[in-house]
Every structure is written in C-alpha cells, then in structure tokens.
Amino acid sequence: MSHRSSTIGHRLSAMNHRPSARSEFLSGVGAMLPLLVGVAPFGLIFGALTPAAGLSAAGAMAMSAFVFAGSAQFIAAGLLAAGTGPWLIVLTTLVVNLRHLLYGATLAPHLRHLPHRWQTLLAYVTTDESYAVSILRYQSDDESPCKHWYFLGSALTLLTVWLATTAVGIAAGQAIPAPLSWGLDFALPVTFIGLLIPHVKGRPTLAAMAVAGLTAVAAHRLPNNLWLLLAALAGVAAGVWAERIWPSLDQPSD
C-alpha cells in the first residue's frame, strides 16, 4: 500500500513540475538569444541592400515579414537588382527553401496532435535556427505537453530581431556605403556551425554532415543554388546508409 502511495506521489510530483506554456515560451526565447549574434548583422545588411534592388522600405519590410528566409531574401534581392524575371526569382527561391520539406518531415510526428492553426503558425515561423533549437527540445526525454510553446518562443524571437534589424538597415543604408564590405561574411557560417554541433550524436550524423558539406563545396557552382538541395539529399542518403551499417558495429560483442 505504501509503495503504491509512493508511486502515485511521484507521478503527481512529476505532473506538478511539468513546464508550463509560459516557461516553455521563455525557454525558447533564451535558447534563441545566442544565435542572434550571427543573424542580426545579416538583417542589417539585407535592409541596407534593398534600395539597390529597387525595393521600397515597405516592400523590404514586407519581404522580411512574409518570406522570413534570409538566404532566399538575399537571393531574391540580388536577382531583382539584376533585372531577373519574376518567375525565375520564384523558382530559384523555391529551390533554396526546399530544405524546409526535410524540416517538416522531421517535425511532423511532434506537431501532428496540434490544431491546424498551430501547425500553420509554426510552419510559417520555421527557419534553420528555430528548427535547430526546437528539434532538440522535442527530442528530450520529458513529456511536456507544451513544447510547441518553446518552438514559438524561439521563432518569434528570431522574427522580431529580423524585422528590427531589417528596419535599421533600411534606415542606415543611405548613410553606410558598401554594406557587403563590412567583413561580416563569417558570422552566419559560424552560427550554423554552432547550430550543428549539438546534433552530432553518433557516426551516422557525422557521416551525413561530412557528405553534405563536401557535396556543397563540390557543387557550389551549380545554377539557381541547386547545390543546397543536392547537398541536403546527399547528406540524408549518407546518414541512412550509415545507420544501416554502423549500429551493428556499435553493439557490444558477446
């Protein structure tokens, strides 16, 4: 009887210590803050570049609000400046963002139980950074029912800073010449390296990262940024292949 009471007590204690929606949201905000060091400079640069692309301030802010994809926005701005037709711009940015299909496939099992309004909202705010920090939370052992609030907190933090830095870049663009010469090219790659490190949990993951990186370097001259999609697919294939081979090698021998 006492053992049963103790078990019930432990269960009640665990339920009482489950993170609330508010605490999950704030934890998501905190998880995103270190990554803003690498993201914010590119928001400034994007805002400063938009006049040369022929975008008005309202158009640039709308792109940051509704597209909300740094690499796609830079590519679109460059193509606009070069006078590229709209359909080619749409196609190119679509190819660049096809990696979000992989993000969606990974997140789907964790979001399937949510109402459609939540799924739509989280799909809209999914970025490389918000995915990277949120998938770690979803893969944690605890059974918190509010992990989607963690996702939302991290994503809205990034969106807020992206919009703010875009606005500052637009305002300062006329006063700061040659924004691409600010020497900030290293910031975003370093940020992505920092995002990847927590995900290295075994040889299959390491193999996927190595193959994707080598493929990206080898194929970087492909048109319309197809190297990005090719590298992602090659990395996935390498990871699947490695998982079939290495688990048996990792098992202890009898």
Image (spheres, grey):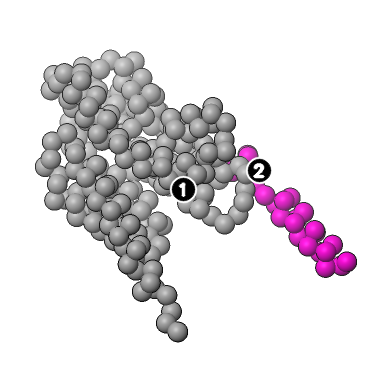
Front: mark 2 or 1: 1
In the displayed structure, 88 sits above or below 97; it is: above
**Does 44 appear in magenta?**
no
Q: Residue at x 41, y 57 (%)?
A: 198
Residue named by callout 2: 20
Along the line of sight, the residue nearer the viewer: 253 or 30: 253
Q: Residue at x 11, y 42 (%)?
A: 221
Q: Callout 2: 10 Å neighbours few (<14), some, many (20+)?
A: some
Residue 180 location, quadrant: top left
**Pointer 2 with pointer 1, Cβ within 8 A:** no
Amino acid at circle 2: Ser
Secondary structure beneath label 1: helix
Q: Earlier in the sequence, mark 2 or mark 1?
A: 2
x and y percentages locating residue 166 in the rendered image: 34, 27
Left or right: where does residue 90 sit relative to residue 198? Answer: left
Question: What range is drawn magenta here?
Answer: 1-26
Q: Quadrant of the C terminus?
A: bottom left
Amino acid at circle 1: Ile
Residue 148 location, quadrant: top right
x and y percentages locating residue 3 in the rendered image: 83, 68
Q: Residue at x 19, y 37 (%)?
A: 225
Left or right: where does residue 108 sit relative to residue 45? Answer: right
Q: Residue at x 42, y 82 (%)?
A: 253
**Does 19 appear in magenta?**
yes
In the displayed structure, 206 sits above or below 135; it is: below
Along the line of sight, the residue nearer the viewer: 155 or 4: 4
Residue named by callout 1: 135
- How far is disc 2 from disc 1 in space, using C-alphas? 18 Å
x and y percentages locating residue 88 in the rendered image: 18, 24
Can see residue 61?
no
Q: Callout 1: 10 Å neighbours few (<14), some, many (20+)?
A: some
In the displayed structure, 90 sits above or below 35; it is: above
